[in-house]
Image (cartoon, rainbow, N blue to C red):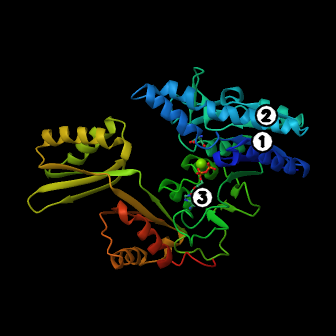
């Protein structure tokens, strides 16, 4: 007998019928003798609906109240799922984040889990109950409701699995595993049987929203066996593994991630002197804006150009800060562009292979796609291109790195 934490995402609990199907699935696991703790998301579309309501009422909704509002979505599905289990004569009990006591910091809308009390859960499990926990939410030291950022139910599930020392954490979603790239964009995308934590973390960080980044960090840190599966069709899914399997030759590139969430800002003709980058980027970080790609280049006339990317939602604020800094520094010009996309190829095999970057760049050149920015890490190469070329570029790279067909 083992303890399994199962998370069901928004599409898996989108209707009463689907919630009933989830209940049947859980009963199947109970009948095999497993203890089951379930984490649910809100019904699909519900979190977006609640956020739009907030935006109708207040230009920049107060973060504390936004958390009170959006956390309601998950509470609905916990209760409905328990009722579906009761209807089928199975014991089940729902908990919201503060009832479990999923303690977080007080960073509303992007809180981090600090500690989980497992007392109630263990005693309910001993009692033969299925425990159903609301994903995405917690409570801070002062008792305020907090939420963990979009996609945060994944993190609730993995954190619970770590706290309970579960045998496996299963993330049920609307695709049957992690693919070489988003299967909604590339028809030839292929399901991976396994992917390492490290690769999954890069994929998630670079835009593959199949798992929230924090959930992968947690799973890697606490060595939680993690699997992504479909709620709708049976299958092995994808196992996220430690990189200890030396029997397999790692593919050079395991997957391609992309995102359209960023915008690019450039400050041109800054008189070149020590402290310029610190001044520009310091001003941006003082506004609590996260910077992603940064490129600086010195021109022959002793001025420097600095380009960086931020989340699109932060572009207007970042631009106004940059214009102020530009005046103080006597820079020539500030430019912005939000029609960009970032594409990343990811693979642990890159560590031991040369020529990957040039293959990536020549593939894009053959497609006449201009590369605007480049960044690399040990297991990833990212490029920023014009947004309209995103799909063409991802498809081209997917076949250039032989990601289609059999593994
Ligand atoms: P849930 O509501 O179950 O949490 P999400 O929408 O958050 O589901 O995540 C599943 C989606 O992630 C898929 O429908 C798919 O479009 C997208 N996705 C992006 N990249 C990948 C990838 N590499 N493999 C699988 N799915 C991906
Ligand atoms: N309901 C939340 C969201 O839509 C959390 C989640 O589904 O993981 O982001
Ligand atoms: Mg999700």
Residue 364 appears anywhere in the view: yes
Residue at image position (14%, 42%) is 329
| Displayed quadrant of residue 192 | bottom right
Q: Residue 265: horizontal and vertical position, in percent?
A: 27, 50
Badge 3 is on which residue? Answer: 197
Badge 1 is on which residue? Answer: 37
Q: Residue 22: horizontal and vertical position, in percent?
A: 77, 47
Q: Comparing marks 1 and 2, which lies closer to the viewer?
A: 1
- Residue 121 got which mark? 2
Does label 3 or label 1 sit earlier along the sequence? 1
Secondary structure, mark 1, is strand
* Of residues 245 and 356, the one drawn nearer to the viewer in this rendering: 356
Residue at image position (25%, 42%) is 319
Mark 1 and mark 2 residues within 8 Å of each other at the beta carbon:
yes
In whole angstroms, how far apart are the C-alphas of marks 1 and 2?
8 Å
Secondary structure, mark 2, is helix
* Of residues 77 and 282, the one drawn nearer to the viewer in this rendering: 77
In whole angstroms, how far apart are the C-alphas of marks 3 and 1?
23 Å
Residue at image position (10%, 57%) is 302
Q: Comparing marks 3 and 1, which lies closer to the viewer?
A: 1
Q: Residues within 10 Å of mark 3 (few under 14, many from 20)?
A: many
- Mark 3 sits near ligand 1, with its Cβ under 8 Å away: no
Q: Residue furthest left?
A: 301
Is 45 left or right of 32, judged from the image as shown? Answer: left
């Amino acid at each position: 007998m083992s303890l399994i934490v199962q998370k069901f995402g928004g599409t898996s609990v989108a209707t009463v019928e689907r919630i009933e199907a989830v209940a049947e699935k859980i009963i199947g696991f109970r009948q095999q003798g497993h203890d089951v703790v379930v984490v649910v998301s809100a019904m699909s579309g519900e979190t977006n609906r609640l956020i739009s309501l907030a935006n109708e009422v207040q230009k920049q909704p107060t973060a504390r109240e936004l958390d009170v509002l959006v956390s309601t979505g998950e509470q609905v599905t916990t209760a409905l799922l328990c009722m579906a289990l009761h209807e089928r004569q199975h014991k089940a009990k729902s908990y919201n984040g503060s009832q479990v006591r999923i303690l977080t910091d007080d960073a509303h809308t992007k809180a981090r889990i600090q500690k989980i009390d497992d007392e109630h859960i263990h005693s309910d499990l001993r009692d033969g109950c299925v425990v159903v926990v609301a994903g995405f939410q917690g409570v801070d030291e002062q008792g305020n409701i907090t939420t963990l950022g979009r996609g945060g139910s994944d993190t609730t599930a993995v954190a619970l699995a770590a706290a309970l020392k579960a045998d496996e954490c299963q993330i049920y979603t609307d695709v049957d595993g992690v693919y070489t790239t988003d299967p909604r964009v590339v028809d030839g995308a292929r399901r991976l049987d396994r992917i390492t934590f490290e690769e999954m973390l890069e994929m998630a960080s670079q835009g593959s929203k199949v798992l929230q980044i924090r959930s992968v960090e947690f799973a890697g840190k606490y060595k939680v066996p993690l699997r992504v599966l479909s709620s709708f069709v049976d299958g092995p899914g994808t196992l996220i593994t430690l990189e200890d399997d030396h029997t397999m030759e790692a593919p050079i590139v395991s997957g391609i991630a992309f995102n359209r969430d960023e915008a690019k800002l450039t400050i041109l003709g800054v008189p070149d002197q020590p402290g310029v980058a610190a001044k520009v980027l310091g001003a941006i970080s003082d506004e609590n804006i996260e910077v992603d790609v940064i490129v600086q280049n010195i021109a022959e006339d002793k001025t420097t150009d600095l380009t960086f990317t931020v989340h699109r939602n932060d572009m207007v604020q970042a631009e106004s800060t940059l214009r102020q800094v530009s005046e103080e520094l006597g820079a020539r010009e500030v430019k912005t562009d939000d029609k960009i996309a970032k594409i990343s190829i990811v693979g642990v095999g890159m560590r031991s292979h040369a020529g990957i970057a040039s293959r990536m760049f020549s593939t894009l050149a053959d497609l006449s796609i201009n590369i605007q920015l480049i960044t690399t890490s040990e297991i990833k190469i990212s490029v920023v291109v014009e947004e309209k070329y995103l799909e063409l570029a991802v498809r081209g790279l997917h076949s250039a790195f032989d990601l289609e067909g059999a593994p």
